[in-house]
Amino acid sequence: MSSIQAQSGVSRSAAWYAVVILTIAYMFSYIDRQILALMVGPIRADLNISDSQFSLLHGLAFAIFYTFLGIPIGRLADSTNRRNLIAVGVAFWSIATACCGLARSFWQLFVARIAVGVGEAALSPAAYSMLADMFPKERLGRAIGVYSSGVFIGIGLSFIIGSVLISGIEAMGGLTLPVVGTLKAWQATFIIVGLPGVILAALVLTLSEPVRHSRSGNSDAMPVRQVLNYVGQQRRLYLLHFFGFAMVTLLFNAIMAWAAEYFIRIHELPRADIGPKLGLLSVFFGGSGIICGGMVADWLAQRGYADAPMRAGLLGVVLLTPFAVSAPLVSDPTLSFWLFAPLLFFVSFPFGPAASGLQLITPPAMRAQMSAVYLFVVNLTGIGFGGTATALVTDFVYRDDMMLHWSMATVAAVGCVVAILLLALALKPCRQTMAELSAGE
């Protein structure tokens, strides 16, 4: 058992068990938030809304409270039992997802999506903090990389499960339930994928809550003034880190929120066919990319690179750029589909280093709070405006629904260029901060 694991009171096997359960929770969260992407056509038709309105359901409705509540929840996670906080959040967002299936109007669905965001705000800040207390820094990258793979496994399963459920329930003519009556296929799908999360919430309670590791011997959350003073001292690094990775999140959402609809609308592929195919790509290439990103960050750290997480993230964005721009633009649907494989691999690559790097540049007593601020920035930017950016370019720049692929490529190109610039500028302050923290150990 490592010194950090000994101090945390959690064995190595218990630490990896926590990784597994937290990864499943993260996977469920992305199934519940992302399954909407396969329902563009049916929801637009039933609620009589535009692409831009749909993008608000997919992004802004979820992101509003997910981002704003993340900061106070992060502070709560720095001073209370993180495991219990996560369990409550899982139960809440799962019930809220099921409630999306009861919506009969745009605004009812909008409010239900807000509730999903409220519940999911409890997960990642607390999970990052728990993992940082369970693993030594030279293995934290792969642990958080595995946890972060839940994003792409969840997205992949949302495409697979969503296409199967929607097609099957549509063939049945809807689903009739006691009290609520007959539901459309998309409504029934929300209920079916949401309710199992209540069982997962109970499973989260089997985790061990680690002792907070603080070299100062103080495990309490830092006073707000002290947190603000530290952030002020490191503001350049935090701003470059947050907004650099926020651009990656934005272009990721700009593409993936519309990927299924792109193949359905532009290439006229059946929903039931493209959903499982995109799902498998996301699981295998997105999941492996995010784990590899964490492993590369650890590999660089072991070879003495103080800026290893930032360097690994930058490498991922550079390699992503040609695929992000070209994948939606090629005219052959088969080639376009296979270009999504490296796109998913490299767009996922930076997220593990982003999360692990943040833990390493932040004092233990404020990790959950800073994780919440990080998630506030990247998710308000990425989830809140990524899918909407594509929709706005389609509706107001190209003014043609059939230019969706050009909108995806346009937003991706801008996002990649800005991300590369910001992450490159972050390398030097990252090295300086890591040196300062190492000197204080």
Image (tube, rainbow, N blue to C red):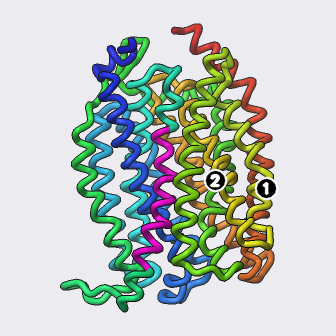
Q: What residue appears at the point 56 percent right and 66 percent down from the top-left corner?
A: 277
Q: What residue appears at the point 43 percent right and 60 percent down from the top-left corner?
A: 31
Q: Vertical placement of 65 versus 166: above or below? A: above
Q: In this view, does 425 lie to the left or right of 122?
A: right
Q: Can residue 5 be seen in this view?
A: yes
> Which span of residues is magenta-colored?
146-166
Q: Vertical placement of 112 versus 250: above or below? A: below
Q: How far apart are marks 2 and 1 (CA)?
A: 18 Å
Q: What residue appears at the point 23 percent right and 42 percent down from the top-left corner?
A: 205
Amino acid type, label 2: Leu
As helix, strand or loop, the secondary structure at mark 1 comes to helix
Query: Percent x, y for residue 282?
Result: 56, 56
Q: Which of the numbered marks, if any, corresponds to residue 414? A: 1
Q: In which quarter of the image is the N terminus?
A: top left
Amino acid type, label 1: Val
Q: What residue appears at the point 41 percent right and 62 percent down from the top-left corner?
A: 32
Q: Which of the numbered marks, if any, corresponds to residue 344? A: 2
* Magenta span includes 349: no
**Farthest residue in the left direction?**
178
Of the pair 346 and 314, the residue shown nearer to us: 346
Query: Percent x, y for residue 334?
Result: 71, 69
Q: Earlier in the sequence, mark 2 or mark 1?
A: 2
The overriding secondary structure of the stretch rendered in magenta is helix
Picture quadrant where residue 83 is located: top left
As helix, strand or loop, the secondary structure at mark 2 comes to helix
Q: Can residue 354 be seen in this view?
A: no
